[in-house]
């Protein structure tokens, strides 16, 4: 079993939709949780990170962590075609960071 | 601040050859990590260097090696290339005390024929 599980998709939504991306993790030692966005032919770009359970909001993006169920989510409001990318969740502790497989998101105009 | 740079961006090699990839971290960052990204396996951790010392290592064969120089620049080497080594190789750097916040370069796309 992988330490971080993520549905690879692809997930296709119309412009303006609310997008929900999800991951689960198995290692109780994980202390921080991140979301990266990766455009085609580019390296991953850090989108959001959090250390605790609860919600963290940044513009149209909300990261949610539930440590009791080991569940990580990213919500994108008012999705735009420019949000089309692969979204990678990551969890870890210390300098150990484990990535999910990534979910391909396509926002249709 | 300039971002993480990787050279070359694209590389084509044949089986049995060896390859060296280079990474220059963000100025002031001393930790450099290397990852292999493939469609089937996703992003897999290769190794991490800090102050010229390998601090962590993933589950890759010994054909994969790396080093870090005193200016924090890092190289990774793959010897005796196999078809399965075709992948995007990503380098990420992080600052002291914030190792979990990794900033990635654009990657080197390696194709092994």
Image: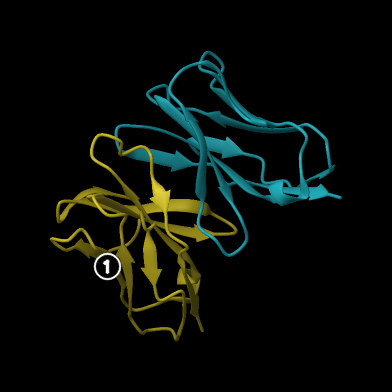
Chain colours: A cyan, B yellow
Vertical placement of A12 versus B90: above or below?
Answer: above
Residue B74 percent coordinates (x, y): 25, 63
> How many numbered discs sit on the rendered protein?
1
Where is mark 1, residue-wise?
Answer: B75
Asked which secondary structure carries label 1, the reply is: strand
| Residue A13 can be seen in this image | yes
Q: Which chain does tag 1 point to?
A: B
- Relative horizontal placement of residue A87, taking residue B105 as reference (left or right): right
Q: Residue at x 30, y 36 (%)?
A: B98
Vertical placement of B79 versus B71: above or below?
Answer: below
Residue B46 percent coordinates (x, y): 35, 55
Q: Residue at x 50, y 58 (%)?
A: B37
Question: Could you classify mark 1 by the number of other residues whose Cα lies within 10 Å: few (under 14), some (14-19), or many (20 or more)?
Answer: many
Residue A102 percent coordinates (x, y): 60, 46
| Residue B59 can be seen in this image | no
- Relative horizontal placement of residue A72, taking residue B102 as reference (left or right): right
Q: Using the image as rendered, state which of residue B94 and residue A59 is in the foreground.
A: A59
Residue projecting furthest to the front: B1
- Relative horizontal placement of residue A13, taking residue A75 as reference (left or right): right
Q: Using the image as rendered, state which of residue A75 and residue A1 is in the foreground.
A: A75
Residue B22 percent coordinates (x, y): 31, 70
Q: Which residue is drawn at 83% across and 37% down?
A: A16
Q: Using the image as rendered, state which of residue B47 and residue A74 is in the foreground.
A: A74
């Amino acid at each position: 079993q992988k330490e971080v599980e993520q549905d690879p998709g692809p997930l296709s939504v119309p412009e303006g939709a609310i997008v929900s991306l999800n991951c689960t993790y198995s290692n109780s030692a994980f202390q921080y949780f991140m979301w990266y966005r990766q455009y085609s032919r580019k390296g991953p770009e850090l989108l959001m990170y959090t250390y605790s359970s609860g919600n963290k909001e940044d513009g149209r993006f909300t990261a949610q962590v539930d440590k009791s169920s080991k569940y990580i989510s990213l919500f994108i409001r008012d999705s735009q075609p420019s949000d089309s990318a692969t979204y990678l969740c990551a969890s870890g502790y210390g300098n150990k960071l484990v990535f999910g497989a990534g979910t391909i998101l396509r926002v249709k105009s | 601040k300039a971002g993480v740079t990787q050279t070359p961006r694209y590389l084509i090699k044949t089986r049995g050859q060896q390859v060296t990839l280079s990474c220059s971290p963000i100025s002031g960052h001393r930790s450099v990590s290397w990852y292999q990204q493939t469609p089937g396996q996703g992003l897999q951790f290769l190794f991490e260097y800090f102050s010229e010392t390998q601090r962590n290592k993933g589950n890759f064969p010994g054909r994969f090696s790396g080093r870090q120089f005193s200016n924090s620049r890092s190289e990774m080497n793959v010897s005796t290339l196999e078809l399965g080594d075709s992948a995007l190789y990503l380098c990420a750097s992080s600052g002291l005390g914030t190792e979990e916040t990794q900033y990635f370069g654009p990657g080197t796309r390696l194709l092994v024929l």
